[in-house]
Image (cartoon, helix red, strand yellow):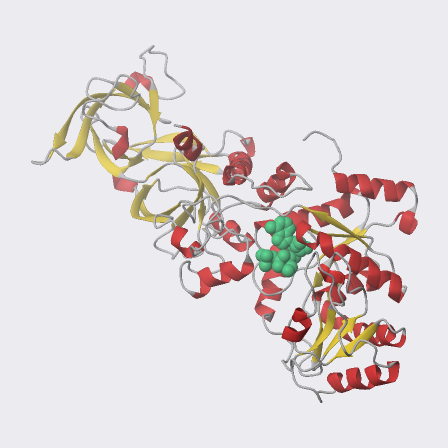
Amino acid sequence: MGDALNFIEHIVEEDIRTDKNDGRVLTRFPPEPNGYLHIGHAKSICLNFGLAEKYGGLTNLRFDDTNPAAEETEYVESIKEDIQWLGFDWEDREFYASDYFDQLYEFAEQLIRDRLAYVDDSTSEEIAALKGTPTKPGTHSPYRERSVEENLKLFREMRDGIHEEGTKSLRAKVDMASPNMLMRDPIIYRVKKVPHHRTGDKWNIYPMYDFAHGQSDSIEKITHSICTLEFENHRPLYDWFIEKLGIFPSRQIEFARLNLSYTIMSKRRLLILVNEGYVTGWDDPRMPTISGLRRRGYTPESIRDFATRVGIAKRNNVIDLSLLEFSGRSHLNKIANRAMVVLDPIKLVITNYPEGQKEELPAINNPEDETAGSRMLPFGRELFIERTDFMEDAPKKFYRLSPGRNVRLKHAYIIHCEGFVADSNGFVQEVHCTYYPETKSGQDKSGIKSKGTLHWVACDKARDVKVRLYDRLFNEENPLAHEGKDFIEFLNPESLKVIEHAKMEPNIPTEEVGAKYQFLRTGYFTIDKDSASETLVFNRTVTLKDSWKKIQNK
Ligand code: ATP
Ligand code: MG
């Protein structure tokens, strides 16, 4: 990374140097309100707002709401919430492509008057049949040479609802022989008698994306219109409209979209997961949506850090999900209070600790943050530890409990394993230890050795909490890359594991929804909105280490 500029920053700096647009930088983030934002959008948001911040410019939020069928107000609200949460501010510059419908309509009439657009009576099949192929030029429509008057009359009739859907469209008169198929007289307006979430039933015609997006940029005087690579071959058309209409010359710049392994980024497919109940909603913590990542426990800082690490490329690539997890961990390590929670409890009895004796041991909340203070941990004769921290016949490198071995209990004492109690099936029910009173944490001058350190919770003060452990949503790195197979087939059936009765220490500093914790040795967790007053529910954001990588590399 370092301080090297990415290719878009190079363009912007050159524009500033040559005083293009008077040195002004105005970008925009243009979501279509047809779903919740995902991590790919987050990358685009960070890029657009980040560039403006860096070069003293501004960023508009513009809803690209030209398709009345799929768009909803719920999505508008969620999009605004997500951008704000990421830490960006569009101030009063909240725009809608639909606000420009009158102006876009005027642009269309202007093209007609300049003999650069015509009403075509062909059906979409007929238009397709005359389009040609990339190597074979198309054929002119029989309606291409209509007079300006006739075109104006017909286009106004389309606007006024006189013509039915599919019977007429307005096409730009560009070049039916262009090697770029998008330049072969693209449709710019179609009849669509569907009410719009903002303009109601005012319009019977709607502009196509290519006629709305660039012109909206121009109307807002956007200087750098950044979009993903799929739009590269739309650029000649984008520039053609600007030139022919004589409007503000926004510049379109394409970059590679973010692809993440083991998940999908298409709103249409994410909607299927939601609608068909494969997940609990757009904010299910397994979803790659911003709201899902937020609920999962990711912080805005970690997502912005991820966007920076991913960088800006000109070629499409796939980023490993573990990079996102890395960014998540790095920030959570700094801000999360530590807590002791036993996920799969087994009882440990300290046989030489007097019955009825109690003590409280100080524990610092966050070694990375002195201001986080400390809390008291109740300690006693009976504790819970993780079942996996005890082994009857342990290999030499097992630095946990096994008969005859020492370990330290975090913030407490070194203990020595004496034995265990098993049921008739050999299932271990209790681990028995003795402790060394002279090894109290912070005061230990005994010289007694121990290798591992375990987390634990006092049985009589333990609080039951519910814990949700997540794994990747799909088993396949790219669930969409398997021809003839539905991506649903690759859903990971073990993407969610719920622990109903984990044992937590009693005195955590805050129980607010969204509070972040590092459970010692098991990962970073956040309090979920499903928490009721009696049961806290925690979502695991990420494990402490990248266990997946290790498994894969074996
Ligand atoms: P999807 O394919 O998920 O439906 P979209 O491109 O249709 O996404 P828009 O709402 O049109 O979604 O996108 C808004 C902005 O976010 C656009 O500028 C688009 O280029 C950008 N964007 C969308 N997906 C990604 C991605 N995966 N990586 C980077 N930018 C993205
Ligand atoms: Mg889109």
Quadrant observed for ligand 2 in the rendered image: bottom right
Which of 328 and 196 lies nearest the eye of the viewer? 196
- In the picture, the quarter occupied by the N terminus is top right
Quadrant, the C terminus: top left
Could you say which quadrant of the image residue 358 lies in?
top left
452 shown above or below 546:
above
Query: In the displayed image of the protein, which residue is found farthest to the left?
Result: 424
Residue appearing at x 82%, y 86% in the figure: 153
Q: Is residue 413 visible?
A: no
In the rendering, at what x and y percent does residue 152 appear? Answer: 83, 83
101 with respect to 149 (left or right): left
Task: Name the quadrant containing residue 312.
Answer: top right
Q: Nearer the viewer, residue 170 or 180?
A: 180
Expressed as whole percent of the image width and height from the top left, the position of residue 344 reads 28, 39
| Extreme residue in the front direction | 136
Decide which of 524, 96 is in the foreground and name it: 96
Q: Is residue 429 left or right of residue 194?
A: left
